[in-house]
């Protein structure tokens, strides 16, 4: 059963569409990478899936009991956010806020969940450290742990390896792949077309006509993929 169905959707700002006639679905266990040139609408699509923006036309349907406030989200960081003066534990636990309801505190189960996730991502030893003192790779693991505290079904990741060195990038990609294999569906915006093809199960390429949605194997054989790689991807 599909977690998300996007049917005939147009997206944009102030009524002006930048993406039209968008059709795709995300199934349970999929790993979807969204690629496209700068300004093609990737971030707008992310915000729309998260309920931060409305569609201009068409509809987005959620299945398998998924609610928008149960989606784990790892956004791109600003320089101000990188300097946030909170402990790692506080930031990871904040991913549980949507599950607190009217309670002004975290439950024992939520604290255990956060501790288990930090252990899984090998950041337990950073629990008491100040977030702004961490390296870029450590900060991304903390934010990934926070996103995992918010969901049991779907992660949305917006350029999760931006600004990281090659070794840290590779490790983070493999970590995301392991999370996906454990049953969490992943939607990731990426500028790295080669990594998208290596790690994903499906590709959505927006910005060109016709739009492409399908398996990564079909995408590798498509004209859009060949042109995108030859043109240098999204960096042009």
Image: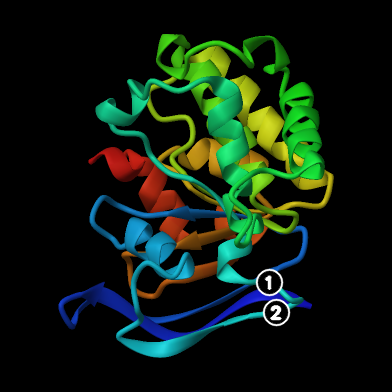
The x, y position of residue 135, in whole percent, is: 46, 11
**Is residue 44 in sight in this rendering?**
yes
Mark 1–mark 2 distance (CA, rounded to whole Å):
6 Å
Residue 78 in the figure: left or right of residue 32: left
The answer to which of 47 and 151 lies nearer the viewer is 151
**Is residue 222 in sight in this rendering?**
no
Say which residue appears at 63% left-offset and 44% top-offset: 105
Q: The C terminus is located in which quarter?
A: top left
Q: The N terminus is located in which quarter?
A: bottom right
Say which residue appears at 77% left-offset and 36% top-offset: 178
Q: Which residue is mark 2?
A: 63
- Disc 2 is placed on an element classified as loop
Q: Is residue 145 above or below residue 44?
A: above
Q: Which residue is mark 1?
A: 66
The x, y position of residue 18, in whole percent, is: 24, 72
- Disc 1 is placed on an element classified as loop
Residue contact between numbered discs 1 and 2, judged by CB atoms under 8 Å: yes
The answer to which of 166 and 164 lies nearer the viewer is 164
Rendered image quadrant of residue 133: top left
Residue 46 in the figure: left or right of residue 66: left
Say which residue appears at 78% left-offset and 22% top-offset: 119
Residue 19: give its label.
none
The x, y position of residue 189, in whole percent, is: 46, 49
Q: Is residue 204 above or below residue 38?
A: below
The x, y position of residue 149, in whole percent, is: 67, 44
**Other residues around mark 2 within 10 Å, as few (<14) / some (14–19) / many (≥20):** some
Residue 164 in the figure: left or right of residue 177: left
Rendered image quadrant of residue 11: bottom left
The answer to which of 26 and 119 lies nearer the viewer is 119
């Amino acid at each position: 059963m599909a977690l998300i169905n996007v049917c005939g959707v147009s997206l944009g700002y102030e009524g002006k569409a930048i993406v039209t006639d968008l059709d795709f679905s995300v199934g349970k266990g999929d790993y979807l990478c969204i690629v496209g040139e700068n300004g093609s609408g990737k971030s707008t699509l992310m915000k729309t899936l998260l309920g931060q923006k409305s569609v201009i036309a068409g509809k987005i349907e959620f299945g398998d009991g998924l609610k928008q406030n149960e989606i784990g989200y790892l956004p791109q960081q600003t320089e101000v956010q990188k300097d946030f003066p909170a402990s790692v534990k506080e930031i990871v636990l904040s991913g549980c806020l949507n599950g607190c309801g009217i309670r002004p505190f975290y439950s024992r189960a939520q604290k255990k969940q956060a501790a288990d996730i930090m252990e899984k991502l090998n950041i337990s030893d950073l629990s008491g450290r100040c977030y702004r003192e961490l390296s870029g790779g450590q900060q991304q693991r903390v934010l990934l742990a926070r996103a995992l505290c918010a969901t049991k079904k779907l992660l949305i990741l917006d350029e999760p390896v931006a600004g990281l060195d090659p070794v840290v990038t590779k490790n983070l990609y493999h970590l995301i792949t392991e999370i996906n294999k454990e049953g969490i569906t992943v939607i990731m915006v990426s500028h790295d077309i080669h990594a998208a093809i290596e790690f994903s199960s499906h590709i959505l390429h927006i910005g060109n006509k016709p739009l492409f949605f399908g398996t990564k194997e079909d995408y590798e054989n498509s004209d859009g993929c060949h042109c995108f790689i030859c043109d240098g991807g999204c960096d042009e």
